[in-house]
């Protein structure tokens, strides 16, 4: 129960910070929105399939952008505000505090994702028709959770570095490329495929496309449910590693005593 | 002391040196190098694979790779430069800067100086990727012309970044503006598709941003155009770059006045 209390307190605290300056949602929307628009402009007269491909990719990017910024800036902001040592000194372990923040940002990520979908569809005035809505929503939510798990993994590493902001900016495009957010990963060099397949969102976006597109031609042979299984296993792996990492980071931060340095 | 402060070149130089020292005081050089070598690679890769997938006959891999190689400059010339005023606010130094008698123009252009060097290095590395990883044919390229394009675009876009930076004096943060303009160039500056694809009412915005002329000139240089053939585009780019810098200075003074009168200078 104390863990749950720490989680909900952290969630409410993050919500309060967000509402103090909600304009921060703009940076996380603008990148995926612009990138989806670029892809649609490249298609010239996009077919319904192309439109879905671009807006689904944009939605996924919106969620990733939000998760990445949340994990990157989570501890960095505490450094700037001088609150990081108080967080470490609190009896609740760090993972519950970061966990509460991540859940808040995952919720905002849903808004990000849907905003990109809705605006792109309104601009191109095409009906947003998905082949199987329940499966689409399931894949969408699970992909978001897998992004949050990946964000947790990164945020553990970000605690140790003063350069979290630089890493955050630098990790946007690699994930867009690696997960094949806007194109099939079959286009990437063969040697990069293991890296792509080790990212849970790669499976998530494939599952979303399976659910949204009738006769999706570039899908993995695992199929929709196979995609979700791989996504689930990888997300659990990320969470397990991040729990271990948070403990290691906590120990190291106390030992080196340079947590406040920025 | 008074001589020093009234000499704009000295102020410019000390501001440039200080900005470089301040950057490496918090940024690990290895991390800086990772950013320098990594960011343009993934940006070019993303759009090259998108272009391959879309298979639009007008927009070749070469078109996209050259556009993005030059546009990779934006992370430095727009994002970093735009955040100059915001960072001064964050660190509580903006008031000290603005009450000093030093010339504003020298101080803030000096702050951006290292980013100009950084920007040139970023674009050179990006063109190296375009040639050796994405197989853009440079065999007929006018390399002197390309170097000139990189130089003019970097200065012009830094001027554009400084213009945006002036907003940071008045707003709570310049980070939002920096993020918006970091990406908007991908859509409106002819980086990934010809400007003619855009609706007619957006095209004037494209031609108000120096990058649009830069991408056009860079493609001309890679296809082997002479300096004479490129001079019109480069001249226009330099002119737009000069105009945005003047506009930036005027905006800076205007927003400074506004921020002082409303007491928002240290709000962040």
Image (cartoon, coloured by chain):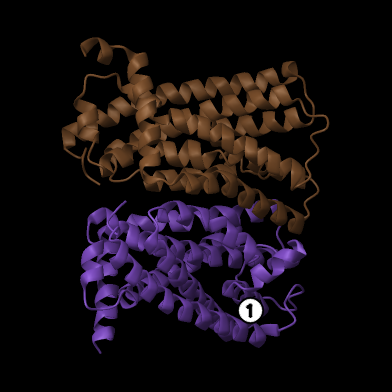
Chain colours: A purple, B brown
- Residue carrying label 1: A207
- Image height of A8 relative to A54, above or below: below
Q: Chain of mark 1?
A: A
- Image height of B209 relative to A20, above or below: above
Residue, far bottom: A1
Q: Quadrant of residue B177?
A: top left
Q: Quadrant of residue B224?
A: top right
Residue B207 visible within the image: no
Is disc 1 surrounded by few (<14), some (14 to 19) or many (20+) residues within 10 Å?
Answer: many
Residue A234 visible within the image: yes
Residue, far right: B139
The location of residue A151, given as percent across then percent down, is 46, 69
Q: Which residue is rendered at x = 64% and y = 87% of the image?
A: A225
- Image height of A145 relative to B32, above or below: below
Q: Which residue is rendered at x = 24% and y = 29% of the image?
A: B97
The location of residue A67, given as percent across then percent down, is 44, 66
* Image side of residue B234 versus residue A19, left or right: right
């Amino acid at each position: 129960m104390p863990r749950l209390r720490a989680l909900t307190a952290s969630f409410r605290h993050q919500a309060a910070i967000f509402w103090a300056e909600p304009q921060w949602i703009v940076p996380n929307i603008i990148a995926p929105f612009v990138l989806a628009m670029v892809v649609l402009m490249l298609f010239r007269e996009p077919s319904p399939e192309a439109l879905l491909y671009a807006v689904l990719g944009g939605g996924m990017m919106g969620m990733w952008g939000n998760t990445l910024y949340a994990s990157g800036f989570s501890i960095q902001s505490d450094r700037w505000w001088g609150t990081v040592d108080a967080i470490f000194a609190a009896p609740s372990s760090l993972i519950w505090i970061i966990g509460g923040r991540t859940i808040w940002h995952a919720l905002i990520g849903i808004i990000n994702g849907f905003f990109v979908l809705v605006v792109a569809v309104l601009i191109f005035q095409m009906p947003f028709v998905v082949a199987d809505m329940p499966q689409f929503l399931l894949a969408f939510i699970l992909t978001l959770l897998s992004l949050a798990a990946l964000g947790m993994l990164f945020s553990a590493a970000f605690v140790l570095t003063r350069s979290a902001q630089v890493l955050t900016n630098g990790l946007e495009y690699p994930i867009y490329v690696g997960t094949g957010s806007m194109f099939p990963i079959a286009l990437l060099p063969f040697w990069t495929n293991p890296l792509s397949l080790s990212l849970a969102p790669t499976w998530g976006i494939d599952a979303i496309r399976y659910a949204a597109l009738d006769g999706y031609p570039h899908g993995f042979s695992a199929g929709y449910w196979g995609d979700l299984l791989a996504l689930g296993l990888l997300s659990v792996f990320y969470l397990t590693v991040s729990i271990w990492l948070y403990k290691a980071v906590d120990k190291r931060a106390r030992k080196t005593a340079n947590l406040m340095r920025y | 002391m008074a001589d020093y402060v009234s000499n704009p070149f000295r102020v410019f130089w000390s501001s440039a040196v200080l900005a470089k020292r301040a950057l490496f005081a918090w940024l690990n050089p290895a991390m800086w190098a990772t950013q320098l070598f990594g960011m343009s690679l993934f940006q070019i890769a993303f759009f090259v694979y998108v272009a391959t997938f879309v298979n639009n006959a007008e927009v070749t891999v070469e078109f996209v790779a050259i556009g993005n190689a030059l546009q990779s400059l934006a992370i430095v010339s727009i994002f970093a430069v735009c955040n100059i005023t915001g960072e001064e606010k964050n660190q509580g130094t903006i008031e000290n800067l603005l009450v000093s008698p030093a010339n504003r123009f020298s101080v803030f252009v000096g702050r951006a100086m290292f980013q100009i060097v950084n920007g040139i290095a970023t674009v050179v590395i990006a063109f190296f990727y375009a040639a050796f990883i994405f197989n853009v044919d440079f065999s007929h390229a006018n390399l002197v012309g390309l170097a000139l394009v990189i130089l003019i675009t970097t200065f012009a876009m830094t001027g554009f970044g400084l213009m945006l930076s002036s907003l940071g004096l008045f707003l709570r943060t310049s980070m939002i503006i920096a993020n918006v303009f970091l990406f908007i160039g991908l859509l409106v500056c002819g980086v990934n598709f010809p400007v003619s694809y855009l609706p007619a009412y957006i095209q004037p915005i494209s031609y108000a941003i120096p990058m649009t002329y830069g991408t056009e000139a860079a493609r001309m240089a890679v296809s082997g155009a002479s300096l004479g053939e490129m001079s019109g585009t480069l001249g226009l780019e330099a002119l737009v770059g000069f105009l945005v810098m003047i506009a930036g200075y005027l905006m800076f003074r205007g927003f400074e006045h506004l921020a002082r009168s409303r007491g928002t200078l240290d709000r962040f």
